[in-house]
Image: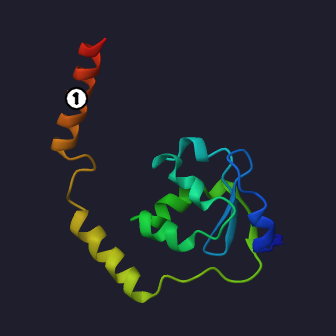
Amino acid sequence: MKEVALSEVGSHNTAGDFWTVIHGAVYDMSRFAPFHPGGPIIMLAAGTDCTVMFEQYHLRSQAALDKVAGCKVAALKGKSPAMGPMFIELQRRVAERLSGEPKRPRSVQVLFLLDVIAAVLAL
């Protein structure tokens, strides 16, 4: 796999031409970005090494990386920042605590339904 310098990644920093680095791998996220579950916040990663930000917002980071594995275009020349063992342990504890919780709590489902009803009534 070819290696790319961070300066080259930095030149791909728009929605239509979006590269980012996660754990030393360079990803072309141009096609994925419009469908990012978290919305446009992903644009903060365009043209950067977003390893730390990625780990902060993706509780199940390996599952998230698996979804974009086909977007990998190169390896980074140099190293991505490491999160450190404390963060990895914290991530494990949070995942363990939330493992039995529903992905969408009942209260969120009810509020969404009320928003839909309010929107329909407003028409």
Across and down, in percent, residue 6 comes to: 75, 73
Image position of 84 with respect to 43: above or below: below
Q: Which of 18 and 75 is in front in this view?
A: 18
Residue 69 placement, left or right of 123: right
Image position of 48 with respect to 71: above or below: below
Classed neighbour count for the residue bearing mark 1: other residues with Cα under 10 Å, few (<14), some (14–19), many (≥20):
few
Across and down, in percent, residue 41 comes to: 51, 53
Across and down, in percent, residue 2 comes to: 83, 70
Q: Residue furthest right?
A: 2
Q: Which of 54 and 72 is in front in this view?
A: 54
Give, as a three-letter code, the residue at label 1: Leu
Image position of 26 with respect to 121: above or below: below
Quadrant of res 113 = top left
| Quadrant holding the N terminus | bottom right
Image position of 47 with respect to 37: above or below: below
Q: Which residue lies furthest to the front in this view?
A: 122
The residue shown at (58%, 82%) is 81
| Quadrant holding the C terminus | top left
Across and down, in percent, residue 54 comes to: 51, 66
Residue 97 placement, left or right of 87: left
Q: Residue furthest bottom?
A: 85
Element type at mark 1 = helix
Q: Which residue lies furthest to the top in this view?
A: 123
Give the color scheme: rainbow, by chain, secondary structure or one colour.
Answer: rainbow
The residue shown at (59%, 53%) is 43
The residue shown at (20%, 47%) is 105
The residue that label 1 is drawn on is 113
